[in-house]
């Protein structure tokens, strides 16, 4: 086990091929601690397998809006996302694996909206918040890179709600918000962001199962010392897409978009 090192994954969206690729890479680095920022389900065709892996492999998982939709009702979802939520719920309610499904429902129902960790990262005493969407609205508020130019009030209100660093997902767009305010893509940072004692940051870890930054590779981050490393990996997105196409209740667009990372 590597000390002072952990991975953060988010927005898996029932994409088993992407998740297994990410977990294999995490294992290859000797990382044993994994935190998840939610949206384990939705869009793709392997919700049960992805839930089982997240249950088995992660130490903490916060609630995402797609997880919430399966538990309760889809809110402000497009047609494809709504259909996927209802189909996933149906899969989880089918007879035949009563014990397994009870465990999956219990997991979804016990996810917190926010989780906080105090840790020493290298020489930095850090307070780390983990939410799915944003510090202000943890489940369903989109915080986009362009907001630093078009909606300063929205961005400033996010930083008022954190003491140090907050990890988010939801938009599927990896990068770092600073309270200047400004936003930096992983490429602009050389794929590494050093957490500093005197700098607030909101870090989007990207998406495992449905990247939307025009890069079709799966993504996650790991933290070693005080450095956040952004990782991208090739995976078999064509296999994921074929599974989506084979399920009439799932929108084929969710398969089409995987090849372009959009």
Image: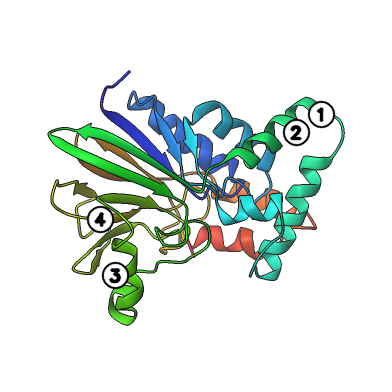
Q: Is residue 37 above or below residue 102?
A: below
Separation of disc 3 and disc 2 at Cα?
A: 41 Å
Q: Which residue appears at 21% of the width and 49% of the height?
A: 193
Q: Are marks 2 and 4 in contact (CB under 8 Å)?
A: no
Mark 2–mark 4 distance (CA, rounded to whole Å): 37 Å
- Can you identify the residue that label 2 sits on? 101
CA–CA distance between discs 4 and 1? 43 Å
Mark with earlier residue (3, 1)? 1
Q: Is residue 48 left or right of residue 187?
A: right
Q: Which residue is the site of mark 3?
A: 156
Give the spatial CA distance, label 3 vs label 4: 12 Å
Q: Which mark is residue 201?
A: 4
- Quick one: label 3 or label 2, which is nearer the N terminus? 2
Q: Residue at x 76, y 55 (%)?
A: 86
Within-10-Å neighbours for mark 4: few <14, some 14–19, many 20+ = many
Q: Secondary structure at mark 3?
A: helix
- Regarding mark 4 in the picture, which secondary structure is present there? strand
The answer to whether mark 3 and mark 1 are in CB contact below 8 A is no
* 10 Å crowding of disc 1: few (<14), some (14-19), many (20+): few
For this orientation, the residue located farthest to the bottom is 150
């Amino acid at each position: 086990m590597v000390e002072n090192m952990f991975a953060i994954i988010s927005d898996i969206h029932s994409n088993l091929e992407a998740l297994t690729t990410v977990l294999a890479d995490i294992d290859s680095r000797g990382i044993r601690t994994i935190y998840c920022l939610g949206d384990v389900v939705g869009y793709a065709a392997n919700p049960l397998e992805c839930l089982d892996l997240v249950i088995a492999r992660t130490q903490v998982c916060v609630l995402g809006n797609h997880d919430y939709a399966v538990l309760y009702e889809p809110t402000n979802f497009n047609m494809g996302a709504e259909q996927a939520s209802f189909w996933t719920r149906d899969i989880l309610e089918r007879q035949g694996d009563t014990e397994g499904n009870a465990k999956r429902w219990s997991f979804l129902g016990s996810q917190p909206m926010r989780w906080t960790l105090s840790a020493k990262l290298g020489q930095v005493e850090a307070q780390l918040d983990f939410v799915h969407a944003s510090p202000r609205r943890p489940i369903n508020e989109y915080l986009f890179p362009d907001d630093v130019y078009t909606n300063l009030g929205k961005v400033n209100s996010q930083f008022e709600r954190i003491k140090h660093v907050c990890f988010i997902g939801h938009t599927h767009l990896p990068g770092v918000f600073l309270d200047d305010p400004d936003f930096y893509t992983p490429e602009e940072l050389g794929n590494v962001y050093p957490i500093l004692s005197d700098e607030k940051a909101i870090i989007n870890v990207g998406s495992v199962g449905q990247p939307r930054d025009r890069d079709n590779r799966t993504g996650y981050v790991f933290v070693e010392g005080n450095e956040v490393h952004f990782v991208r990996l090739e995976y078999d997105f064509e296999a994921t897409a074929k599974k989506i196409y084979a399920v009439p209740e799932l929108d084929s667009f969710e398969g089409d978009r995987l090849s372009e990372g959009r």
